[in-house]
């Protein structure tokens, strides 16, 4: 926490009293802007720092400079520094504080009329616990340093760029060390992998173009990056968030990064880390912890646009059952709707009595049902949802009338989710629909917002729009372009859609108006975020259950309310590879429940590709097969070979459900990604900094899939330590310095390895998460191979998964820490239980413990549980096996021991301790 006396951290060092002439040479001046000078600085009432900046010389490129700026800085916590620059004389657009709750700076009136410092400060510092802000007065620049080692994290003192602040153009740059590895700045499809690639374009502006478009602004806007550095074997990470919802280009050149933003303010947040896990903890502490997910959400999901009637859906469920492929959730795209209209049912193809009967049957066995909702509300005088929306005045306006657009039902208006009345109306429509159809979650799509038309449109006279023939995404309204305002045609053109299209192209006109006069120009990228908040509130109010929402468009903080899928990908090997990087990025963005359409949304995956894709997709946090209307059917049972791969890969997933669910709890309480890059666990191991073909689940489970056509082997990187194959615990790879190993990977095999020092809780699996979670547990304890001394840790979170909150202390949850040690032949495995009553009431038990990597002869003795001989209290079986351990660096082999204890019946909800000695 910040010291209650911020002045202790506040230091103004007057290192020079020489007057810095305002006409001094400015090496970082550009033709766009000549920079600013600091004319006064003072401690703010809240303990922060307030300064006034005056423009050095005005220019006209991209509009006039704002002459007087306010500079505000505050160490908000020990590990978070805020630096905001805005107009000193009048408020500017900021991300609304009610959407993303945070501290508010002092009112602008407190920054005007302050005493000027007659002798400008040429070097100054403002110190916090972990970070230090320094600044120069003329030209004004600032830098952020890590106090522990003096390393500069962010430095605007650039030779090629100056601070520029105009009404519709803001520019600022930072220098970067060449060795810095950057991650983030999405959403985009990155062909070079997760690590940002110098000179690739990074444009942030929510846009409905498919994810097959590379290096383009896609569905979400996340103006945050993580910076990982390694200096002499010592690694440190930090993050930088520019909290701004306006469109922007970010230019990363390897040794610099430049923001070019078309509105709003500079509102930077610096998170000190120093580990990647610390960074996401600090970041999600600020933007909101990831939403708790119900247990069933970690099961497998099946969807398709084109399930024309209910009988097709019923057949899909039955065919998964026949194929013995796990399935938890069946989805409908808009096929269930009446004329593509939200909150309706097609009375012919999805008659309500038959649908309710189907839902009653699947609900009884634990399956769930989710449908799509698009934000566009059909303009239709007989449509109650639309009529109630009009009556409540909930739609975004253009020239005083609801803005007219076109999506699937034809002409639509868009709800304005910044309006409190809209949030209430939306909640009522969700309630009405839930009474019609008891869905288990909602899928909110097209919320960038997507529009099949551009400009000012009206409904054509004398023709049906849409006609009902041909693709439904062709604009059929009568439209004309809107270019008459500077909001529709700003002076600086961001690289929208990767081709500098107008920012109002196929979306809401940027001069349209939201609640309280807010312009779409400013709020555009918040649309999906605001809809997620409204939908979350609506679902939470229905039955007191934990909501599940899947949103295509996201912004900073969306993970607090929704899961995400990566949009319209294609059934190609390249798209399979890209999916890993996008998934890993969203873990950094605070949206850990994420996945891509398995086998690809657009046609057409080959049989081999679909085999390999389910072997990756089975380990996405959100695992769903989804396909396009025009694609051939690609459910996992359509090919017998794919069905076999699905049984294998999903079979592993369903055994790992307690591990995945525990990871989701950790994500909810500390922001940790479920799927994460290897550098999260191995931050000093530079070989994995750019690795985008393997990933971790949690800290210890590594997935090494085949991502290339025709391959039956995979070259996998194994960071230093011991790794045990999940498919064969006797297969072990160890190294001191890390090693690449070529693994066999026949068509139906995906390589999964468990790292040393871990305890992995698993269950038997099943066809449904509801049945899988009632089966007994096995604990797999992994020591460093052959170590005479070592330790291992793991944990387990269990709860009544549809309770709204995911927390301890409510009587509906249990948390268990598992620990193990080996020392001089003595082995101990034990648990420490918090809130054990839930697990005891549910009857959860541990039936087996496997301990890997032991040294010894294979003979064990004095096996005890809770101080009593094991055989006196249970009919357990103890077995040992000796197996070969591969030294991946030296190609050497040695013998290690695996001990297996089966037939146990240990209550999960009660502490236990098991000990034995190795011969």
Image (tube, rainbow, N blue to C red):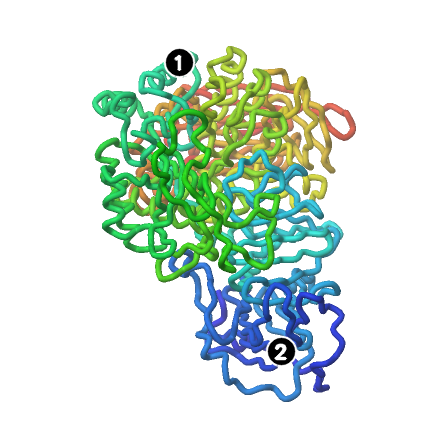
> For the residue labelled by badge 1, is the local secondary structure a helix, a strand or a loop?
helix
Nearer to me, 326 or 461: 461
Q: In this view, does 642 lie above or below 204?
A: above
Q: In this view, does 774 lie above or below 795?
A: above
Kindly identify which numbered label has been placed on residue 319.
1
Image side of residue 869 versus residue 892, left or right: left
Image side of residue 294 versus residue 582, left or right: left
**Where residue 582 sits: x, y (%)?**
57, 38
**Residue located at (76% from left, 25% from top):** 892
**Where residue 394 sits: x, y (%)?**
30, 51
Q: Earlier in the sequence, mark 2 or mark 1?
A: 2
| Residue sitting at the far bottom | 118
**Where residue 836 sits: x, y (%)?**
34, 39
Residue occupied by mark 2: 38
**Residue located at (73% from left, 23% from top):** 893
**Residue located at (68% from left, 24% from top):** 714
**Residue located at (38% from left, 36% from top):** 443
Nearer to me, 501 or 232: 501
**Quadrant of the rendering where the C terminus is positioned:** top right
């Amino acid at each position: 926490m910040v010291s209650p006396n911020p002045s202790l951290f506040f230091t103004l060092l007057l290192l020079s009293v020489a007057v810095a002439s305002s006409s001094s040479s400015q090496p970082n001046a550009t033709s766009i802007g000549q920079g600013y000078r600091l004319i006064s600085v003072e401690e703010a009432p809240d303990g922060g720092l307030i300064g006034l900046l005056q423009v050095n010389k005005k220019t006209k490129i991209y509009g006039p400079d704002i002459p007087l700026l306010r500079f505000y800085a505050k160490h908000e916590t020990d590990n978070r520094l805020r630096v905001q620059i805005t107009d000193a004389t009048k408020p500017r657009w900021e991300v609304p504080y009610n959407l993303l709750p945070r501290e508010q700076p002092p009112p602008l009136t407190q920054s005007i009329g302050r005493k000027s410092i007659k002798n400008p400060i040429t070097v100054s510092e403002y110190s916090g616990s972990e970070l230090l802000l320094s600044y120069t007065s003329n030209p004004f620049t600032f830098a952020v340093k890590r106090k522990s080692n003096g390393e500069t994290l962010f430095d605007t003192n650039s030779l090629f760029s100056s601070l520029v602040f105009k009404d519709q153009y803001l520019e600022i740059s930072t220098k970067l060390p060449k060795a810095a590895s950057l991650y983030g700045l999405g959403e985009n499809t990155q062909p070079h992998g997760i690590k940002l690639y110098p000179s690739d374009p990074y444009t942030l502006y929510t846009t409905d173009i498919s994810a097959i478009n590379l290096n383009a602004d896609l569905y979400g806007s996340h103006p945050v990056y993580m910076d990982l550095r390694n200096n002499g074997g010592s690694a440190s990470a930090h993050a930088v968030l520019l909290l701004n919802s306006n469109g922007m280009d970010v230019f990363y050149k390897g040794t610099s990064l430049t923001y070019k933003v078309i509105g709003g303010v500079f509102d930077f947040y610096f998170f000190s880390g120093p580990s990647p896990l610390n960074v996401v903890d600090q970041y999600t502490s600020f933007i909101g912890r990831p939403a708790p997910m119900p247990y069933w959400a970690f099961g497998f999901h099946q969807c398709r646009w084109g399930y024309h009637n209910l009988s097709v859906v019923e057949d899909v469920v039955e065919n998964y059952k026949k194929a013995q492929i796990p399935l938890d959730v069946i989805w409908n795209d808009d096929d269930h709707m009446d004329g593509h209209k939200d909150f309706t049912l097609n009375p012919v193809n999805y008659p309500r009595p038959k649908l309710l009967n189907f839902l009653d049957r699947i609900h009884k066995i634990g399956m769930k049902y989710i449908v799509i909702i698009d934000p566009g509300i059909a303009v239709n005088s007989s449509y109650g949802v639309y009529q109630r929306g009009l009556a409540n005045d909930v739609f975004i306006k253009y020239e005083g009338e609801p803005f007219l657009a076109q999506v699937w039902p034809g002409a639509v208006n868009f709800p304005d989710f910044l309006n409190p009345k809209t949030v209430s109306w939306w909640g009522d429509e969700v309630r009405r629909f839930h009474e019609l159809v008891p869905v288990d979650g909602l899928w909110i799509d097209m919320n960038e917002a997507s529009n099949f038309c551009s400009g000012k449109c009206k409904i054509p006279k004398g023709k049906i729009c849409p006609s009902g023939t041909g693709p439904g995404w062709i604009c059929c309204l009568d439209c004309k372009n809107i270019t008459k305002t500077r909001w529709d045609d700003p002076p600086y053109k961001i690289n929208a859609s990767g081709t500098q299209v107008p920012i109002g192209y196929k979306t809401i006109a940027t001069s349209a108006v939201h609640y309280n006069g807010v312009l779409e120009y400013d709020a555009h990228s918040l649309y999906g975020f605001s809809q997620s908040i409204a939908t979350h509130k609506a679902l939470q109010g229905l039955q007191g259950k934990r909501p599940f929402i899947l949103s295509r468009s996201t912004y900073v903080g969306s993970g607090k309310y929704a899961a995400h899928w990566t949009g319209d990908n294609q059934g190609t090997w390249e798209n399979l590879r890209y999916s890993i990087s996008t998934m890993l990025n969203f873990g950094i963005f605070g949206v850990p429940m994420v996945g891509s359409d398995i086998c690809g949304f657009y046609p057409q995956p080959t049989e081999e590709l679909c085999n390999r894709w389910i072997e990756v997709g089975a380990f996405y946090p959100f695992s769903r097969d989804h396909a396009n209307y025009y694609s051939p059917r690609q459910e996992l049972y359509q090919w017998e070979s794919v069905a076999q791969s699905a049984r294998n890969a999903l079979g592993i997933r369903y055994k790992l459900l307690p591990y995945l669910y525990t990871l989701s709890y950790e994500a909810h309480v500390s922001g940790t990604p479920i799927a994460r890059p290897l550098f999260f666990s191995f931050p000093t191991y530079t070989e994995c900094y750019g690795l985008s073909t393997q990933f971790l689940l949690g800290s210890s489970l590594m997935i090494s899939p085949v991502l290339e056509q025709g391959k039956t082997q995979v070259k996998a990187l194994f960071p230093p330590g011991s790794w045990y194959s999940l498919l064969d615990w006797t297969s072990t790879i160890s190294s001191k310095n890390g090693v690449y190993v070529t693994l066999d990977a026949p068509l139906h095999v995906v390589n999964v390895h468990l790292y040393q020092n871990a305890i992995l809780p698993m269950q038997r699996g099943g066809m449904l998460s509801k049945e899988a979670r009632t089966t007994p547990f096995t604990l797999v304890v992994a020591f460093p191979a052959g170590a005479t001394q070592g330790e291992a840790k793991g944990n387990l979170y269990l709860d009544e998964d549809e309770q709204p909150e995911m927390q301890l202390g409510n009587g509906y949850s249990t948390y268990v820490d598992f620990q193990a040690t080996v020392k001089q032949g003595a082995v101990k495995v034990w648990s420490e239980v918090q809130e054990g009553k839930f697990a005891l009431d549910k009857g959860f038990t541990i039936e087996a413990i496997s301990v890997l990597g032991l040294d010894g002869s294979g003979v064990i003795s004095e096996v005890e549980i809770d101080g009593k001989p094991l055989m006196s209290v249970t009919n357990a079986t103890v077995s040992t096996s000796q197996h070969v351990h591969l030294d991946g660096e030296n190609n050497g082999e040695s013998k290690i021991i695996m001990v297996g204890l089966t037939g146990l019946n240990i209550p999960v909800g009660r502490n236990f301790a098991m000990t034995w000695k190795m011969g």
